[in-house]
Image (cartoon, coloured by chain):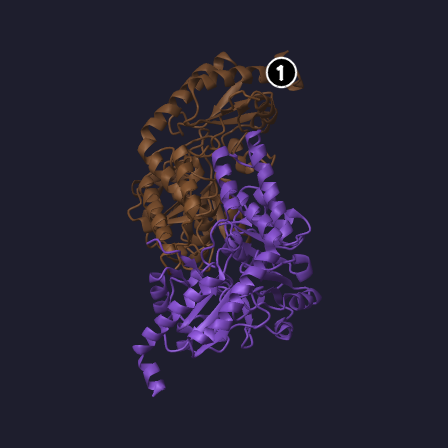
Chain colours: A purple, B brown
Amino acid sequence: MDMKIINLDHLSANPLLPEVQDAMIEAIRENHGNPSSQHRMGERAFESLSNARKSVAKLVNSPTPEEIVFTAGGTESINHAVKGVALSQSKKGKHIVTSNIEHSAVLRSIKRLNMVGYKVTSVPVDESGRVNPEDIAKAITDETILVSVMHSNNEIGTIQPIEEIARITKEKKVIFHSDAVASVGVVPIDVQKLGVDLLSFASNNFYGPAGVGGLYIRKGTPVWPLLEGGVQESNKRAGTENLIGIIGTGVAADLAYRDMESRIAHVSKIKDRLLRELPNYIDDYFINGHPEHTLPNMVSVSIQYIEGESVVLMLDDEGIAVSTRSACAAGSLRASHVLLSVGRDYADAQGTMVLTFGTDNEEEDVIRFLSSLKDAVTTLRKISPLYNEVEK
Amino acid sequence: MDMKIINLDHLSANPLLPEVQDAMIEAIRENHGNPSSQHRMGERAFESLSNARKSVAKLVNSPTPEEIVFTAGGTESINHAVKGVALSQSKKGKHIVTSNIEHSAVLRSIKRLNMVGYKVTSVPVDESGRVNPEDIAKAITDETILVSVMHSNNEIGTIQPIEEIARITKEKKVIFHSDAVASVGVVPIDVQKLGVDLLSFASNNFYGPAGVGGLYIRKGTPVWPLLEGGVQESNKRAGTENLIGIIGTGVAADLAYRDMESRIAHVSKIKDRLLRELPNYIDDYFINGHPEHTLPNMVSVSIQYIEGESVVLMLDDEGIAVSTRSACAAGSLRASHVLLSVGRDYADAQGTMVLTFGTDNEEEDVIRFLSSLKDAVTTLRKISPLYNEVEK
């Protein structure tokens, strides 16, 4: 089929930018070597690794590049942060505070810790998906050793009051990790201004390669390594580096830093258009998330009386890629804990689509999407017993 | 400098084979997408992932591809296996049996477990670096939940009697992990014949990309995931896959399988030549490791009265890349625990070089290396007070 594919699922599959492709291909062709080698074949590799680290440090405004640890992606960063802090602090306490709408990497890491004796308090969110910092303050006890609250939600886009939470954790001397996988490279992130101790992110969310991520660890923050062995990454993460991916990540970080404003303007325009036009095409839907504290590249819409999975398949036939929710969970079919937490019921959660926009989208894509969406929704509602009953 | 670089440090920096480069570049250019996506952009990615898994499964003769989990490298595979089995079996027991010459990824993983209450018995090796299976049998108690013994040693090349050890662990119903990072792709590895429950390996040891590895987990083996979150890798290893690296790994595995015999013949010839010629160039040295049960691509030589680090630097000036020992530990300057375990003293350990050969080496490289080595050793011994004293 020669039809242009419209990608409205950038969260799961961002394309690599041409500059990122070129840098990775050059690295492949030139055989950079191993940064840990003792001879000159390793020198160039070491330099490439350092440069990429500087680029990433700049993107999140880390005061020194050495506070950035390269990982195999957002999931590793999160597991490293959550498990690593908790295990290192077991003598001080075994209580963790988190929110009800965290990514599965945070949830499952905490669940695992719970299995080995850690206690967890999970604070609720309001119907826009926001945590109340007061709830975090109240949840912290003398036993609390870690607070983990995401910067932005990967399903509904709501941005949390991280600075306010950091003020509380600093005052109470509790370590604060934020999963910023959906934010870094999409909106400005400044680890110093945010006041976090650890911050997780992933390269493919800013058009770098999948399978590469980073973890900002504020100097002096106690955290056990997840991967142990060699002395790579200042002894914080062992293993021969995925240098080709890291080089691509460095370039992607440079471009994200340089183009941040124009990218935000671009996706905001598309998002606005979609929200404005949506009522002209379908009815009986909710927009999930906060109207202001939200990612500029994401729309979560719960459409009543349909199955989101069916819409995904029907749009796929039209060459339009969308997601029912984060690709990480796509293989599982439970209702999203995030949607249930913001007040959607089970049926509405099933009818939810997450749209994420990118540099390759145009405003016209929205119209083609809406037109196909309208057809899909109309078709599906015709065969929905519930819809037909409600309509009567 | 236009001088041909002679790489005798393949263990730390294998070049990517042209076919591997081409496959990775194609993957970069074609934007494969995310294997977990729900739409057709993910289909091709899913297919590429499956194919790579089949190729790797074939290389280690895994009965089903699903028993292979892709990781971010040998270190992750080892941490996953050792920590994952130990933590999953804590109710059964907390005793681990290992050998004195394991890679730092095994040692440090076990040390970490020791910090949280696990007991360890580490069996010695003979002067050739071999474990006596009887020692493993004696070390196993009712509390033992894991035996971890490497297939081949990454510093001296000695290959362990894995099948014999597996017979013991099977009889005693203890889970058996083998770190085969230095072996897979270099010598034939058959997980069924070996009888291991888990086997770790890394792509860059067979001319695939660094930062990609695999873990064979025999069906039914209890092991907690190290990275948790999404449902990738049959729920055994969460995180968006490094698909570009995995595609390269699949091609590298296919080539390693196809060319195994000719590669072994090639490096064996070079190794033989080196060992035969060595006495014509230097004296006062030991060859470390076992004469027969050994990797065909590796020579470890301890040269008395010199510092290996100095030789590395002097050879580097001549365009010859060698290593004092595994690149993973290159940043640390302690004497190798492996060399001390096979009876070298501290001084001889300091004078040790590890040479690893590859497809790009020629027999003539050995002669150029030996000639430069002779010069370096002569120069260094001239300024060695110990050597001059001994010579008197």
Instruction: Tell which subunit mark 1 falls on.
Output: B
Q: Secondary structure at mark 1?
A: helix
For the image shown, how many numbered marks are present on the structure? 1
Q: Position of residue B48 (x, y in %)?
A: 36, 48
Q: Residue furthest bottom?
A: A392
Q: Is residue A32 above or below residue A133?
A: above
Query: In the picture, which quadrant includes the C terminus of chain A?
Result: bottom left
- Is any part of residue B217 visible from this angle? no
| Badge 1 density bin: few <14, some 14–19, many ≥20, Cα 10 Å | some
Q: Is residue B223 above or below residue B193?
A: below
Q: Position of residue A29 (x, y in %)?
A: 47, 34
- Is any part of residue A217 visible from this angle? yes
Q: Position of residue B354 (x, y in %)?
A: 50, 28
Q: Residue at x 38, y 72 (%)?
A: A374
Q: Position of residue A337 (x, y in %)?
A: 46, 71
User: In this image, A249 relative to A317: left or right?
Assistant: right
In the rendered structure, which amino acid carries the disc numbered 1? Thr
Q: Residue at x 56, y 33 (%)?
A: A42
Instruction: Provide the residue designation for mark 1.
Output: B379
* Image quadrant assignment for residue B293: top left
